[in-house]
Image: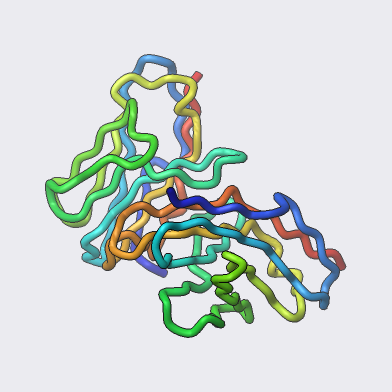
């Protein structure tokens, strides 16, 4: 069965520091993987997605993620955190061609001045 | 921004009453989804639709029903609300099955 694990429900970084949000998945078939961001009182916004093309995926707002099959990981990174990056981030997995779309429990990112 | 409107945005009701949440889209997307978001659980799929009058259950469908009589509207109904259904409900749409692309701003539902 598919599952997604996000390590760390809360992450704090200083402004300008590297952002690293971790996501590990399990899937019996090659998955589609996604990262979403949620700002307070808003819905989720798609940051980036992996659909079996390039393993390094670039998204919006300077974020990128690398698919590592050997590690079953899809960690989200950004070289330099900005105050506006403070939000909750969700990793999600979907088996290609199905409607079973599983979200992780989320990681709340706090950016310190 | 994608044209998705959820109504109401907030609702407080009592246990045992029926509740209907509405999702309206102006994107003409084929697929529509209802999720609930709870602390520690992320988002969980309740029901989804892959066309007019075509719907199916998600992972937490018990106590919920849906209807889609036209492309732009997807209704979620709690026939007899329970306190365990207190949550934030999100509608999502996509033009590709299985990959919600745009989310509404959510409906915060409290059942007392």
Which residue appears at 26% of the width and 33% of the height? B65
Q: Note whether residue A38 is visible.
A: no
Tally of numbered tags: 0
Whole-percent x, y for residue A111 in the image: 79, 64
**Furthest-top residue in view?**
B16
Q: Nearer the viewer, residue B95 or B109?
A: B95
Whole-percent x, y for residue A14 in the image: 85, 69
Using the image, determine if residue A98 lies above or below residue B10: below
Left or right: B104, with A55 as reference point? left
Quarter of the figure with residue B17: top left
Q: Note whether residue A111 is visible.
A: yes
Whole-percent x, y for residue A39 in the image: 60, 58
Using the image, determine if residue A73 lies above or below residue A88: below
Q: Nearer the viewer, residue B92 or B73?
A: B92
The C terminus of chain A, quarter of image: bottom right
Left or right: B20, with A56 as reference point? left
Left or right: B60, with B57 as reference point? right
Which residue appears at 37% of the width and 48% of the height? B6
């Amino acid at each position: 069965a598919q599952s997604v694990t996000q390590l760390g429900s809360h992450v704090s970084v200083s402004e300008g520091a590297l952002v690293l949000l971790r996501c590990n998945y399990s899937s019996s078939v090659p998955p589609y993987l996604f990262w979403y961001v949620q700002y307070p009182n808003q819905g989720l916004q798609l940051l980036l997605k992996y659909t079996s093309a390039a393993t390094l995926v670039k998204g919006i707002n300077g974020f990128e993620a690398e698919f590592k099959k050997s590690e079953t990981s899809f960690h989200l990174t950004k070289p330099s955190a900005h105050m506006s990056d403070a939000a909750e981030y969700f990793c999600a997995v979907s088996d290609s061609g199905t409607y079973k779309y599983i979200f992780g429990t989320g990681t709340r990112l706090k950016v310190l001045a | 921004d994608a044209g998705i409107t959820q109504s109401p945005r907030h609702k407080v009701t009592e246990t045992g009453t029926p509740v209907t949440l509405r999702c309206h889209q102006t994107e003409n997307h084929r697929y529509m989804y209802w999720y609930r978001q709870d602390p520690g659980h992320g988002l969980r799929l309740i029901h989804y639709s892959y066309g007019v009058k075509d719907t199916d259950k998600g992972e937490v469908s018990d106590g919920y029903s849906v209807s889609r009589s036209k492309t732009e509207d997807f209704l979620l109904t709690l026939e007899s609300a329970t306190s365990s259904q207190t949550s934030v409900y999100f509608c999502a749409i996509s033009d590709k099955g299985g990959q919600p692309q745009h989310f509404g701003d959510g409906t915060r539902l409290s059942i007392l």
